[in-house]
Amino acid sequence: MSNTLVVAAPAAPRGCFSIPALHEAVPPRLTQDLLRARALARFANAAERAGVTLPSGDFLDIEQVVAAQWNQFLAARYPEGVFDGLAGEPVIGVDDESLQVVIHAQSRLNAYQLKPVVEALEARAAGLGWFVEAVLTRAGFHGHLIYDMGMATYMLDVFHSSLEEFTDEGYARALLLENGDALGTTKAPIPVETIDSLRQQYGFWPSDLLAEVGGHAHLLRNGQFSAPAPKAMNWRQARQWLRACPRHALAGAVDAAIRLQRALERDAAREFVWNSLDDETETLGALCFLVWDAPDLVFEAVQHFEQNQYSAGAVVEAFARRTLDLRHASDHALQALAAATVAYFARWALLGSLLSHFPIWEDADES
């Protein structure tokens, strides 16, 4: 048997502060967790006002509520599998300073082939196939990153930045200059034998890049050497063709391209473009590969690029984001963030719908 005695605390000395008993609502430990949870709760309410209904079900914390809210919204609005062909993981997160929607990279990406669709549409109406290709290219400038031949050329700029002309001879001359060979300083033609010898040691020759895009040099988008793009229809002309040929096998591709183009036009502020200057981060990743026919050169270029990004230091395996500083997180700003996220998913779904009409390159060596 034992007795528990409650001893009254001695009175505080005169002139000293005393701490009264704390109310049960006061947390025993002061952290930012409550502020972050409150920011997420406000975002959930703002998203509801933007059309993202609060979820049904039982949840243990606000993080689960927000995740379920967006998952249920996407499942109800879009057909099953519409996002499956494009690799990306959206994450809503909050820290002490900001609320972010980030599209994280994933490791397995489809490689879509342009050639069959573009050539089939061009055979039907001049400029139609190139309209569809141009829409896909524009998507990358709105946070929907794609590893295409233009990206490959950008990644390979370290090999081509000193060229005076985008030819094999110009590339050979730059290599000779780099190696201190006097032949590189002359204006005389580089002997074929010398170029053949350099080919055994170096890759990424201009003729190889041009062959990789079927001779369509504009797909390389290589700065000062860029070739003019072939004449493409605008979306109104494409819509006229679609009305005249609604039963064409690729009518669905043209329709998706028109709708995606219109959605891109509405994203005038390019809401989800990652500005690396904000925090000196380097991004990595994309939704897919987009090649003309064979992807070998693009794969190799991306491998070099990603290795360089990792060695650079502050690399983030993500490629699109929208950030809201919590100091400016008014109800209006939170609703704008939710609306921008809804619009991003709408463009993502349209891009997935469009690319579903393109064949996926299959490695013949895969079992």
Image (tube, rainbow, N blue to C red):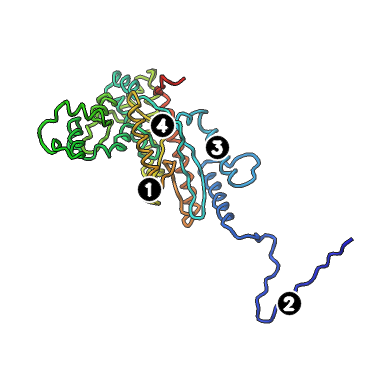
Is there a contact, CB below 8 Å, between mark 4 and mark 3?
Answer: no
Residue farthest to the right? 1
Residue farthest to the bottom? 14
Residue in the foreground of this view, choosing between 365 and 357: 365
State the SS at label 1: helix
Residue of label 1? 276
State the SS at label 3: helix
Kindly identify which numbered label has been placed on residue 288.
Answer: 4
Q: Is residue 247 above or below residue 315?
A: above
Q: Nearer the viewer, mark 4 or mark 3?
A: 4
Separation (CA) of disc 2 from disc 4: 71 Å
Residue of label 2? 11
Separation (CA) of disc 2 from disc 3: 57 Å
Q: Position of residue 327 (x, y in %)?
A: 48, 57
Separation (CA) of disc 4 from disc 3: 22 Å
Q: Where is residue 300 in the image (x, y as percent from the top left)?
A: 35, 31
State the SS at label 2: loop
Kindly identify which numbered label has been placed on residue 71.
Answer: 3
Is there a contact, CB below 8 Å, between mark 2 and mark 3?
Answer: no
Kind of residue at disc 3:
Asn
Separation (CA) of disc 1 from disc 4: 21 Å
